[in-house]
Image (tube, rainbow, N blue to C red):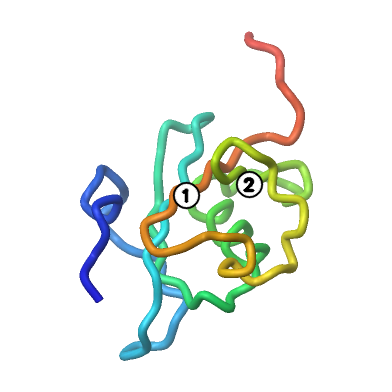
Amino acid sequence: MTQPFVGQLRARSSTIRLVPQGTQGITIRVEMPEVWDTVRFLVAPREPLLTVKVRALEALFPEAELHSDFVLKFRGWDILDEASPIADLGIENGSILLLTHRRRRPVR
């Protein structure tokens, strides 16, 4: 499988692998506007979305206390069922997810 275009966009140099070495997966990006940073994942289509969210928070915002304070968005919509496999949510090779605070925060 060739790397999708989003795999070539600016992101951290390392890819977070959620599939065993030698196993085929899909490449997705998770962007977090609060820290102006992006991580790239190689993940199995049957991986629960919650795993991606927790690993993205560990990489992008380690000071987060509760993952439930954050939401992942896909195509502008909040993803409500985080226990679902990413393929069941329509997320495919090259998809971009947005990770942000669940509630708006005041600008200081």
Whole-percent x, y for residue 26 in the image: 39, 70
Q: Nearer the viewer, residue 9 or 86?
A: 86
- Decide: marks 2, 1 in contact (CB < 8 A)? yes
Position of residue 17 relative to residue 77, above or below, is below
Whole-percent x, y for residue 81 in the image: 76, 58
Mark 2, other Cα within 10 Å: few <14 / some 14–19 / many ≥20: many
Q: Earlier in the sequence, mark 2 or mark 1?
A: 1
Question: What residue type is disc 2 on?
Answer: Leu
Whole-percent x, y for residue 20 in the image: 42, 87
The residue carrying mark 1 is 30
Mark 1, other Cα within 10 Å: few <14 / some 14–19 / many ≥20: many
- In the rendered view, does 18 fall on the left or right side of 76? left
Element carrying mark 2: strand
Q: Which mark is residue 72?
A: 2
Query: What residue is drawn where x is 58% and y is 42%?
Result: 99
Query: What residue is drawn where x is 34% and y is 64%?
Result: 15
Position of residue 16 relative to residue 44, above or below, is above
Element carrying mark 1: strand
Q: Nearer the viewer, residue 54 or 84?
A: 84
Query: What residue is drawn where x is 21% and y is 70%?
Result: 2
Q: Which mark is residue 57?
A: none
Farthest top residue in view: 108
Whole-percent x, y for residue 12 in the image: 31, 50
- In the rendered view, does 103 fall on the left or right side of 19? right
Estimate the spatial distance between the alpha carbons at disc 2 and disc 1, rounded to whole Å: 9 Å
Q: Nearer the viewer, residue 108 or 70?
A: 70
Q: Quadrant of residue 10?
A: top left
Query: What residue is drawn where x is 59% and y is 36%?
Result: 76
Q: Quadrant of residue 41?
A: bottom left
Position of residue 86 relative to residue 99, above or below, is below
The N terminus is located in which quarter? bottom left
Question: What residue type is disc 1 on?
Answer: Val
